[in-house]
Image (cartoon, rainbow, N blue to C red):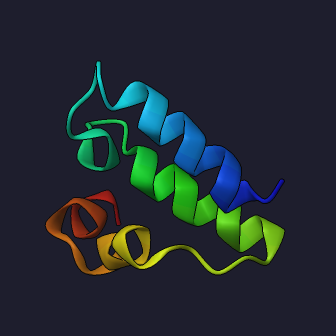
Amino acid sequence: MTVNEALRRLADELSEEIPDLLTAPLSFGLLWLDLCRLAGEEPPADVAALIESPVAAAAD
């Protein structure tokens, strides 16, 4: 199982309780991006788009 597959399953499972999971204050999306970077995997487009988002800019 890849990082993307595992995180997509987790995101799907948590989405019922946390509707905006990818942009939550402790950004699951930024965590996903970093784990993909560490694993040498390409993140999915919706997750990669967070790099350009105001949430990512605020974290810098």
Q: Quadrant of residue 52?
A: bottom left
- Percent of width and height locating residue 22: 33, 49
Out of 46 and 36, give the one closest to the viewer: 46
Q: Is residue 32 above or below residue 18?
A: below
The x and y percentages for residue 17 are 29, 18
Instruction: Residue at 79%, 77% (x, y): give it.
Output: 40
Question: Is 57 displayed left or right of 4 in the figure?
Answer: left
Looking at the image, is 46 positioned above or below residue 58?
Answer: below
Residue at the far left: name it.
54
- On screen, residue 57 versus residue 42, left or right, reads left
Query: Dividing the picture into quarters, in which one does residue 45 lie?
Result: bottom left
- Identity of the residue drawn at 37% across and 45% down: 27
Q: Is residue 29 left or right of residue 49?
A: right
Foreground: 12 or 48?
A: 12
**Whole-percent x and y of residue 14?**
41, 27
Along the line of sight, which residue is nearer the eye, 54 or 28? 28
